[in-house]
Image: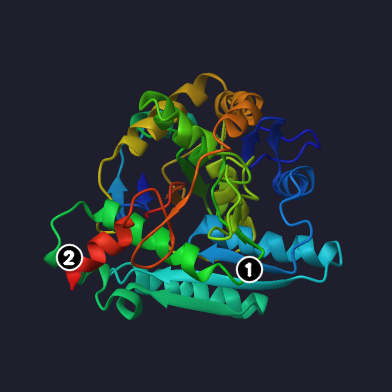
Amino acid sequence: MKVFLEKEGKYLDVEFKGKTVPDLLKQLNLNPQEVVVVKNDEIVLGDEPMSEQDDVKILSVISGG
Amino acid sequence: MFCHCGKKAVIETRIGPLCKEHFVEFFESCVFDTFDNFELISNAKNIGVAVSGGKDSTVTLYLTQKYVENKNLNIEIEALCIDEGIKGYREYTINDLKRVCSDLKVPLRIVSFKQEFNYTLDESLKKINTKSCRLCGIFRRYLLNKYSKDYDVILTGHNLDDEAQSFLMNIFNANTDLIARQGPITGVISSSGFTTRAKPLFWCREKEVFVYSLIKGFNLRFVECPYASSSFREVARTFLNELELEDINVKYNLINYLLRILPDLKKAYANGEIKRCKICGEPSSQEICRACYYKKQLA
């Protein structure tokens, strides 16, 4: 799965082992309070299923200042 | 995860998961209730909003204007930006800010370190041996105070996370006097040298502010300050966000507790005396304020 990490400004190739948004964040060691996951241009959370074909962006909630 | 209306939720809040429409409604009432309950701008005719081009100050500006229009208040709003002169960072956020202010038709005033101190922050740090965030904070607060004197109140974009982090940091540092200055309206001593500062996003979690700015399409880019580094605030933020995984009300409860003890603290520190800096005449806890101390080193 290709995941765009906004904070780092780069794409990651992730061998996704789970099924849902929390699974992905856990795998990437990210706190769900500090990021927003956007799948195919929609904000997603909770038990939303994720698949290899999805366009996934992870946006940082915390300001850069 | 679904909203109570059956639509897909975009965020979990303290009242449960909410869809876009219900979240916008919840978020805006939260901000408007803060204006009402704490009388943030009652009797004000001129309001300044401290802005940076980031999500918090942009949302503050947008919702202040919306509140003033909804209530049909006769209040002038101006956006005030402090440009520190940080290459590769501030020029981008100022571009976003100019676009937002132009869209909202709010006049924007930009005050820069360069114009005030003859040096940008980048240049100052080559001449003064101190931590970047310390120098930046001292100069920023100095300019914000100096240039907000024309306003009856200056609004800032501090959110619930900022407030909870500050509270925790002040507890760990035993800074009771700094806790006394916290709250939706800052300060303990009324003085002609200080313009009242107020925080409309006081009850909004940082994630909520971010999601609201996304839904509203403010199109603010993520740019990281090159001086951003590990700090005590970051440790407090991580700690609180980890606690919030267990209980979404952690920051909310912490701030409710702060509000319970705040009246007594404000009373206890209300009789302090505010001195004036011998050089610039601005309020200062010492004979010469820190801004003038560093300005002398730059000269």
Quadrant housing residue B171: top left
| Residue assigned mark 1 | B151
Q: Let me know if marks 1 and 2 both belong to one chain.
A: yes
Q: Quadrant of residue B132?
A: bottom left
The answer to whether any part of residue B1 appears in the image is yes
- Disc 1 marks a residue whose amino acid type is Tyr
Q: Residue A32 versus residue B27: which sits nearer the camera? A: B27
* Image quarter (top left, top right, bottom left or bottom right) of the N terminus of chain B: top right
| The C terminus of chain B: image quadrant | bottom left
Q: Amino acid at mark 2?
A: Gln
Chain name for mark 1: B
Count of numbered circles on the image: 2
Q: Which x, y percent locates residue A64?
A: 37, 54
Furthest residue to the right? Answer: B72
Residue closer to the observer: B82 or B96: B82
Examine the rendered structure and indicate whether residue B222 appears above or below residue B92: above
User: How far across and down, in percent of the image, does residue B130 sit?
Assistant: 18, 53
In the picture, measured across the screen, residue B40 lies left or right of residue B280, that is: right
In the displayed structure, B284 sits above or below B70; it is above
Query: What residue is shown at x 75% (from left), y 69% (from top)?
Result: B45
Work out how far the residue at label 1 is from the one at label 2, CA to CA, in angstroms: 31 Å
Host chain of mark 2: B
Q: Which residue is mark 2?
A: B297
Query: Does residue B53 appear in this view?
Result: no
Residue A16 position, x and y percent, is: 36, 35
Q: Residue at x 53, y 53 (%)?
A: A40
Local packing at callout 2 (Cα closer than 10 Å; few below 14, some 14-19, many 20+) is: few
Tell me if residue B177 comes above or below residue A8 in the rendering.
above
Q: Is residue B107 above or below residue A59?
A: below
Under circle 1, the secondary element is loop
Residue drawn 58% across and 40% down?
A: B205
